[in-house]
Amino acid sequence: MRAVKFKSFSSGSCGNLYLLSIEEDGAIQDSIIIDAGVSLRTFKKELAAEKIPLDSVRAILVTHDHMDHIRSLGSYCKYLKLPVWATEELLTAMMHHTYTLDHLGAVKRPLKRDEWNVIVPGSFEARYFIVPHDATQTVGYGIKAGPLRFVIMTDVGAMTSEALAFASHAEVVVVESNYDREMLMNGPYTRDLKLRISQGSGHLSNDECAESIAMFYHEELTHVFLCHLSENNNTPELAVKATSDALAGIGLLPSYPKSSVFCSETGRSLIMQPLPRRTPSRLFTLKEEE
């Protein structure tokens, strides 16, 4: 039996790190992480709690160079010496970044544009797409994880046609649902910060995320994870409601009230789950096959 597992260690402005693993006959063989905004100590502790061997982690993908995504990357480079995959532009910027400049050089691996890059032979391939966000450069990833097609886009100022195209071929999508527009506009943030968040190069609102999910939904999509929820301008309930309403608009309804499982008219099911901001999620099984 082969299975693909997924876990979020933290998802929000306090830190971001996501794990994808391939399990063979009940034992994790290969894993990668996306971003390194969680301390190495916390990462090791959570891996041990899930009985995932540290030496199963083979590589790191980086989405962009904001602090909450690379805060601990230098430690991972120094102590784990894992290859760090990112675009040439991001790697160049991170060679001069406080968190990474001393330890990135020996492990950096540039990604080729518009093709699948072998990240872990036999287990993981990745292809990036650029999304608008006010970092040096920000990307989402399409990932072939064993038998699974997976997409992650954690900071998205506005949805793009390329991002939608990647998501429309994925079985699992992790997508930002950052803020509730009313909470943001009526909240204590300065006008400039509100504009930075909401005008195309900041973050994706609940409604924008929900509309995007309705656009890229297809019947092979099995899981949608809502990520990077704002602590000050959102709640899990508001994010879930926006997406639930959008799913209802295309004919997917919860299997029972407040269920995270939505069913189409043809009987296909979709699991929709918000990821916790500061704490690890459970370990999800995304796909199993003989």
Image (tube, rainbow, N blue to C red):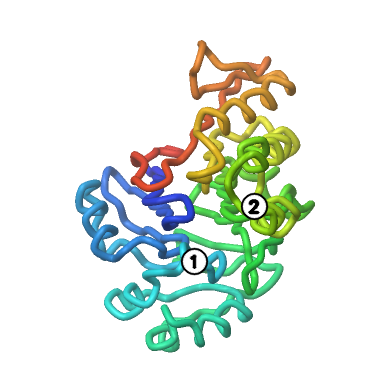
Give the left or right position of residue 45, taking residue 140 as reference: left
Between 278 and 171, the one lying in front of the other is 278
| Amino acid type, callout 2 | His
Task: Say which of marks 2 and 1 sits in front.
Answer: 2
Residue lying at 50% horizontally and 33% vertically, measured from the top left:
236
Query: Picture coordinates of residue 289 (x, y %)?
Result: 43, 38
Query: Is there any visible trace of residue 43 in the rendered image?
Result: yes
Which element is circle 2 on? loop
In the image, residue 181 above or below residue 108: above
Residue lying at 60% horizontally and 51% vertically, measured from the top left:
189
Indicate the quadrant where residue 53 lies: bottom left
Between 70 and 142, the one lying in front of the other is 70
Kindly identify which residue carries mark 1.
61
Query: Is there any visible trace of residue 289 in the rendered image?
Result: no
Which element is circle 1 on? strand
Kindly identify which residue carries mark 2.
203
Disc 1: CA contacts within 10 A as few (<14), some (14-19) or many (>=20): many
Q: Quadrant of the N terminus?
A: top left
Query: Picture coordinates of residue 90 (x, y %)?
Result: 58, 77
Q: Are marks 2 and 1 in contact (CB under 8 Å)?
A: no
